[in-house]
Amino acid sequence: MGLRLIIAEKPSVAKNIADALKIKNKKDGFFEGNGYVITWAFGHLLQLFDAKDYDKKMEKWQMENFPFIPENFRYKVKTDPKKRGKEDFGARKQLRIINSLMKRQDVQMVISACDFDREGQIIGDSIIYQLNSQKPVYRLLLNEWTAEEVLKGLEKIMPNSEMKPLQDAGISRQWADWMIGINLTSVATLKYQKGSGKALNIGRVLLPTLKIIYDRDKEIEHFVPEDYFKLAATFSTDDGRVYEGIYIENKIEKFKNRADLEAVQQALINRKAVIVDKKVELKKEYPPYLFNLSNLQGFITSKFKGWTSDKVLKVAQSLYEKKYITYPRTASVVLEESLVEKTAKVLDKLKTGLPYEHEIQFSKKKRVFDNSKVESHSAIIPTYVIPKTLSNDEAIVYHAIKNRFIMQFMPIAEYEETRITTKVNSSDIKGMFATKGKVQLVEGWKKVEDIKSNDVILPLININELVNIVEHKITAHTTTPPKQHTEKTLLRVMETCGKGIENEDSNEIMAAILSGYSIGTPATRAETIKKLITVGYITMENKNLVCTELGKNLVETFPVKDLFDLEFTGRLEKTLSEIEKRKFTKEQFLHLIVNFTVNAVQTIKNSEDVTLSKVTRAKKKFEVVGKCPLCGHSVIEGQKGFGCSNWKKGCKFVIWKNDKFLATMKKKPTKTMVKKLLAEGTVLVKGLTSKKGSKFDAHLKYEKNIDNEYFSWKMEFAEKKA
C-alpha cells in the first residue's frame, strides 16, 4: 500500500499532525513515517498575476488601459514583501519540495489539511492543482489540532471534489477583490491624486467600513445637545427606612421645561405620601453566549489597553495552532450537537481545582448546542489540551475563552427586582414617583469573572404604607451625542451589516450571521480595520476610530456609491456564502462583478476632476553626528544605526542602535553618546547594568580590530565617588 501525502497550511500544523501519528523523522521540508508524508505551505505560496504580468503595457498606469479584466486568471509564486517584485525564495523552495513529493512513485494520494474555510481551501487547491497532480486528492476537515481529533479526522477524509462549492466561493472572492481593487484603485489614483508613489486604495470591504465610521462622525458633528430636567425625592418610613424615587408623569421622566417640575416641587411641601404599588419579580440572568471571533475581538479590545482586533486574531490563531483552542475564525456563538460528548470531557478537565468546581455541572443546553445556529464552524472553546505555559498575551485570550466556556455550565444567576410606586397626597401632582432596586440571590456564572452588580438595595416596605418626604431636588442634564466607534462597536456593525446591533442576543443578529449577510468575514474584518489606518483613511484616538480628512473627502467625492452601501456589500458577501451552499454559481457571481467593475471605471472616468490627495516626497535629511575615524567622512544617523556616509565606497564604520554588547548591559547608543565618542574617543556612560542586576558607570571606547575592518568596544570602570 502506498503512502499518503498530507499538505498542511503551516509548519506548526504539520508538526501537530506528525505528533498525532507519532512520526519523529523530519527531513528538509517534510516529515515521513508510519505510512504518511507530511509537508506544509506558509499560508499562500501562490498569488494572482499582477496586471503587468498579463500585458507589458500595464506596467505604467494609463487611464485608457482600464478597465483591465484578464481572460483567464493565473497564479505565480508569491512575491517577497521585503524585495519588491522579486519572488519569495522560501515559497519557491517549498513548492519544489511539495512538487517532488507529489510525483514520488510511492505516494498514492494527496490530502489537503489546510484550514477548514474559504481561504484554507484555495491555499491547498491552488498548490495541488497548479502542480498538476494526477493522483486522487482528499480533504481533511478539522476544527482543532489535538491528537485525538487528527486521528479521528484521518479516518473520515472525503474526496476534495466534494469541496468544490467552498473552492468556488474562495476563488470568486479572490478574483472579485482583484478586479475591483486593481481597476478602481488605479483609476481613482489617476483621477483624484496629484503626485506619485502612493495609491488611493479602493476595495470591496474597505469602503463600506470607512462609511460606517464617517456616518458616526457626521452624527456627532450634527448633534444638537438638549437640556432636560429630572425630579428626585427621598422618602422615609416612621422608623427611618429610606429610599429614593424619580418623578414620572404620563410615562415621561425627562422634562424639557424646568418650571413644570418646580410646580410639582412646590406641591410637595408639607405633604405625606403612600406606597400604592409594589412588585417583586424573580428574574434570571443567563451568561453571555460563547465567543465567535468578532465577539472575542470586541471583548478583549474594550477590556484591555493596547489591543487591536488584528492582534486578538493573531494570538487566537497561535493558541489554535498550539492545540489549546478550537478554530477561531468562526461566526457562530453555539456548538454543533455532535460535540456534546467532547465538550463534557473538556469541561471535566478544565473545572478541576477551581474554587467553584462543585457548582459546575455539564448539561446539553439549547443555548450551547444548537445545529440550527451554527454557521460552518462552532463557537470558540478550549480543547482538552491544558497549556503549561502561556505568554501574557496568550493568557489574556485563553482565559477569556476558558471563562466564557465555564460560565455556560454554572448556575444561572438570579436576582429579585423590586419596583415601588409612591403617590403624594396632593391633587396638584398628577404623576407618581418610581423606584427600582435589585437583590442578587444567586451569583452563579458571575463568580467566574467576579462580576459585581452595582445594584440599589431597597429597605423592606409594604404597599399602603405611609411615608414622609425627606428631601427633593431637581437635577439638570444634557443629552449626549452618540459615541465614536471603537473596534468593538465597528466589528458588530460589520458582522451584521447593522442589523439588530443593540442587543447581543437578538434573533436579527443570529439571522444576519447565519445567512452570511455581513461586511467581510470573521477572518478579514480585523485586517480591514488595520488597513484603513495604514492607508490613512481613519485614525485611532485612544480606543476611538475617527475619519481623517482624506477619508472624509473620499466618502464625499468618490462617485461609485454602491461601494459605500452596506446593503450592496452585504448582498455580495451573502452571495459568496450562497455559492458555498450551492445556491449560486461562481460564473453568475463573476459575471456580476465584471459588469460592476466596467461600469464603476466608466463612472470614475466621467466624474468631476477633483484632487483628493497630494503626494509630496520630502528629501531625507540626515543629521551629521561626527567624523568617521576610518576615512574622515561624516557619520550620519540612519534608521538602524550611526554609520559612515561613505559606505557606498566600502567604509565599514557603524554603531548599530541594537548593539549587542551594549544590550547585555541594558543600554542603547544615543545621539549624544555617539557625538561625544567621535569627538573625544571616549565617553562616560552612566547606569549600565551588570549580569547580577547592579548599576555601574564606565568609560567606553570604540576601537578598530587589528585583524579586520570592524570595531569592538573597550570598557574601563569609572572610579566610584567617595
Image (cartoon, rainbow, N blue to C red):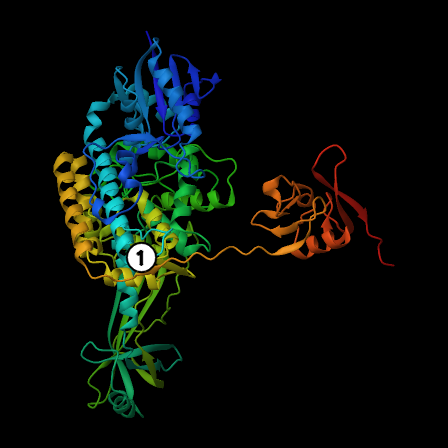
The quadrant in which residue 457 appears is bottom left
In the displayed structure, would residue 184 be above or below residue 231?
Answer: above
Left or right for 24, reference 686? left
Left or right of 297 in this view: 354: right
**Helix, strand or loop for disc 1:** strand
Q: Is residue 342 above or below residue 500?
A: above
Q: Residue at x 31, y 60 (%)?
A: 551
Q: Residue at x 81, y 48 (%)?
A: 717
Q: Quadrant of the N terminus?
A: top left
Q: Quadrant of the C terminus?
A: bottom right
Q: Which residue is mark 1?
A: 193
- Is residue 50 visible in this depiction of the protein? no
Q: Quadrant of residue 320?
A: top left
The percent coordinates of residue 542 (x first, y second) are 43, 61
- Tell me residue 452's x, y (percent): 42, 59
Q: How many marks?
A: 1
Residue 630 position, x and y percent, is 71, 44
Q: Amino acid at mark 1?
A: Gln
Choose between 349 and 497: the one closer to the eye.
497
User: Residue 493 versus residue 382: which sits nearer the camera?
Assistant: 493
Residue reaching furthest top? 1
Q: Is residue 474 above or below residue 442?
A: below
Residue 158, horizontal then vertical, whole percent: 24, 22
The foreground one among 591 and 512 is 591
Whether residue 517 sits left or right of residue 416 in the image: it is: left
The answer to whether one can see residue 251 in this image is yes
